[in-house]
Image: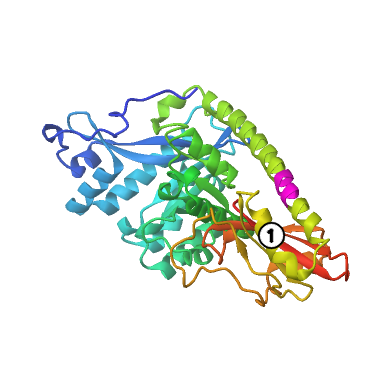
Amino acid sequence: MLQTTSSRALGLVPPDASSVPDSVRRMLDTNSITTDFQPIFSVRQKCVVGMEALARGISADGRIVPPQALFRMAAAEGLRDQLEVVCRRTAIRGFSGLHARPDELLLFLNLDLAAAARHETIPADLLALVRDAGLLPRNVAVEFLEARVEEVARFGALAAELRKLGFLVVLDDVGAGDSNLDRIPLFRPHVIKVDRSLISGVRDDFYKQETLKSLVSLSRRIGALVVAEGIETEAEAISALELGADLLQGFFLSRPQPATAFDDGVRAASSVERLARNFKSHMVGEINERKRQHRRFNVIQNRMLLDLTNAQPAEFDGILTQLMGDFPRVECVYILDEDGVQVSETICNPAVSQRPGAALFRPARRGTDHSLKEYFYVLLDVELQKYTTDPYVSLASGNMCRTISTSFRDAENNRLYVLCVDVNP
């Protein structure tokens, strides 16, 4: 079981003015650099898959100096390179000494390229450190701190060399600061760590949700895993898992802790078991709600089709207008002919507010060509009975919507038409 540690011991409470450490030089000379480890979890497998090493300094009066303050001090003293080397060595030795460490456990090791004076020596130096500690390169995931990378091409070559030696390559802080997606094909990471800024509040933010889903989709296509960083609530954890994150890391699951906290073995805490149960319950509820939603949408369509199949095209607008008031979740409806040309006006729900930007967002008029819209050509070309799009921004209202399309024939002339219903997702 993971032990708890006070916030001051974690470095979350900064030392007061009277306890400011004398210097990083003193800490280096007196071996006062330590490493805490924060577990990275697979909730689906209910286990710890990795441990991120986080450097800590010990001040002259015994207080903990967090990494940000530590490296700021080192920069002021011109000791960033020496501090980086010591932190790396201390982290590897601490990880190799973890009690009952599973063979497959990964060490996530931050690589501060801004602190490294000679980048070309890093692969060989790191390989020697790992082997001296009795580890294999496959057990070490090297995190490139993306926001600090300026010489992208050179560091891409460094990532390639580490990959060739058997290390895992990790891009950290993706989605924050100076991080750019164009570095993904250059670094070809095994793991992408999504920054806290995209995870915070993701449950209630559609744009963050879609951004995270896009990163997950990209990662899966290139064979990379996604770690959601900075998980601080169960709601964030469940949302990240629902959107496809493979691994989770954050205070909600475990705070960084000294190596001694894992003396009884590295294993998932009870909170992970509980999270796994709650995630499963959430997903079952979501699936049941989608089933209920589809049934409601079927009722809407069937009601409209019942009247439309017995009507003349000239009557379409009147029928749709009359029916619109019965379905508050419908944003607008319109009908296309067999060529994808709109034969009705777009009948909008007066209760639905339009997004600002009327010049861009306005309902399509009769005669508009929709033949290249997926809700038309997929429905007819694949010969489906019904087609539902993914959520998208409606050009009629500017709101997020799904379009549900289905074909029908009028009773008098047996002509083919497509009914399109835009619904709030």
Q: How is the image coloured?
A: rainbow
- Image position of 415 with respect to 236: above or below: below
> Which quadrant of the view contains residue 151?
bottom left
Which residue is pictured at 41% across the width and 40% down the height?
A: 53
Q: Does the magenta run of residues contain 18?
A: no
- Asked if residue 231 lies left or right of residue 314, the reply is left
Residues shaded magenta: 294-300
Which residue is pictured at 47% across the width and 25% down the height?
A: 2
- Image position of 51 with respect to 331: above or below: above
Residue type marked 1: Leu
Q: In front here: 178 or 132?
A: 178
Q: Is residue 170 visible?
A: no
Looking at the rendered structure, the secondary structure element under dot 1 is helix
Residue 180 place in picture, x, y as percent: 44, 63
Q: In front here: 193 or 122?
A: 193
- Asked if residue 304 lies left or right of residue 182, the reply is right
Q: Is residue 102 visible?
A: yes
Residue 161 place in picture, x, y as percent: 50, 62
Majority secondary structure of the magenta segment?
A: helix
Which residue has dot 1 on it? 320
Q: How many marks?
A: 1
Q: In front here: 29 or 204?
A: 204
Q: In front here: 371 or 269?
A: 371
- Image position of 152 with respect to 1: above or below: below
Residue 411 place in picture, x, y as percent: 87, 64
- Asked if residue 98 lies left or right of residue 284, the reply is left
Q: Residues within 10 Å of mark 1 (few under 14, many from 20)?
A: many
Residue 263 place in picture, x, y as percent: 47, 23
